Amino acid sequence: MIPMLDLKLQYAALKNDIDNAVADVLQNTHFIMGPNVKQFESEAAQYLGVKHAISCNSGTDALHLALRACGIAEGDEVITTPFSYAATVEAICYVGAIPVFVDIEPNTYNISTQAIESAITTKTKAILPVHIFGQVAAMQEIVNIAEKNNLKIIEDCAQSFGSKQNNQQTGSIGDAGCFSFFPSKNLGCYGDGGLFTTNCDKTAEQFMLLKSHGSRIRNQHEIVGWNSRLDELQAAILRIKLKHIDEFNNNRISVAKRYNELLASPTIVTPSFENNGSHVFHQYTLLSENRDAISEQLTKENIGHAIYYSIPLSEQPAFKAISRSESLTNTLSICSKCISLPMFPEISNQQIEKVVSTVKSAV
Ligand SMILES: *Cc1c(COP(=O)(O)O)cnc(C)c1O
């Protein structure tokens, strides 16, 4: 049996530090907005190279409240990718805006900048790129498009903690960055958690109000807000894991390189990436015409795998009627061929070789 990811190995490696940190929080009983939350926010801001990092309850909340903090509202159009998790587009729907789905690049699975440009209308207010599977979207071009058309950029960094382009971390390039600490993410806690980042004081202030009942002074509520907090226990765990994130991500990159070498074959398209930290391999996702046969064979051998994503968001019943879609040729093709293999920092060479021989036996 080879799992898709093995969180037990990571816990075993960090057990002493994590158990002590959790015990300290339990002793301290400052469970909400305690010292670890503040410290984690400042350590994350420093790591990511942003002026403000504000924690919240989930990546979904970070996206939702980031759109609100950026002033995106009813009837505005937000251009995004259909090749992502549902939360990306739910956030757009929560503020009453219209998701506009555009196609992705065939080699990176990231939003196509050409497709963004041709989808812009007078109602377009924002671009929401997702750094899918941990690979940075074409941010320089996206920034240029946004500047030219006066659009906000909200980065979905749920899968990309630690990946960077030209030495800029994801989440520090657009107007806002939104991270998830769901346990399976590159930086994951032991429950739900999220983070919002920005370099803009006003947007940070607005996000702070929105996530804390519209209140900055106790018992004074300026706007209708939400309750979205990162637990002290989760912050304490994240502070320990943040110290190891580069090591985790470097291991993932090594695993991906090994997979790419071993899987090279005419019937498999391995993920293309530059070896410069711009891909941190939240997922290792290949393309093959024989995807279903590969999946069957992996199931037979008890090897974890997943189809991220089999149905584009544009085709999901929840979003179909309330969104607009441009031509999505690449997306549809990739949805029919993609399959994600076991990927975690601690996977062994032996496990990698077993996954590869099983995949190869099916193509
Ligand atoms: C996980 C994920 C989210 C949502 O994060 P949660 O913390 O689970 O709410 C949003 N977008 C993408 C691309 C994700 O992978």
Image: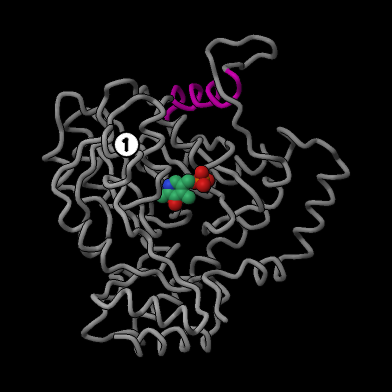
Q: Main secondary structure of the magenta part?
A: helix
Vertical side of 43 occupied by 7: above or below:
below
Quarter of the rendering containing residue 208: top right
Q: How is the image coloured?
A: one colour
Left or right? Give the position of 108 relative to 194: left
* Residues packed near mark 1 inside 10 Å, few (<14), some (14 to 19) or many (20 plus): many
Q: At which x and y percent is residue 232?
A: 72, 41
Left or right? Give the position of 207 relative to 268: right
User: Magenta stretch containing residue 61, yes or no?
Assistant: no
Residue at point 64% right, 51% down?
Answer: 238
Observer able to see residue 222: yes
Q: At which x and y percent is residue 327?
A: 13, 48
Q: Relative to the observer, which residue lies in front, 75 or 248?
A: 75
Outermost residue to the right: 27
Observer able to see residue 170: no
Residue at point 39% right, 42% down?
Answer: 88
- Magenta residues span 200-213
Quarter of the rendering containing residue 184: bottom right
Q: Relative to the observer, which residue lies in front, 328 or 18?
A: 328
Q: Relative to the observer, which residue lies in front, 257 or 190?
A: 190
**Residue matched to label 1:** 153
Residue at point 54% right, 71% down?
Answer: 345
Q: Could you tell me which quadrant the N terminus lies in?
A: bottom right
Count numbered badges in the picture: 1
The response on whether ligand 1 sits within 8 Å of label 1 is: no
Vertical side of 206 occupied by 18: above or below:
below
Q: Amino acid at mark 1?
A: Ile
Residue at point 52% right, 80% down?
Answer: 302
Q: At which x and y percent is residue 229?
A: 63, 34
Q: Could you tell me which quadrant the C terminus lies in?
A: bottom left
Q: At which x and y percent is residue 271?
A: 30, 71
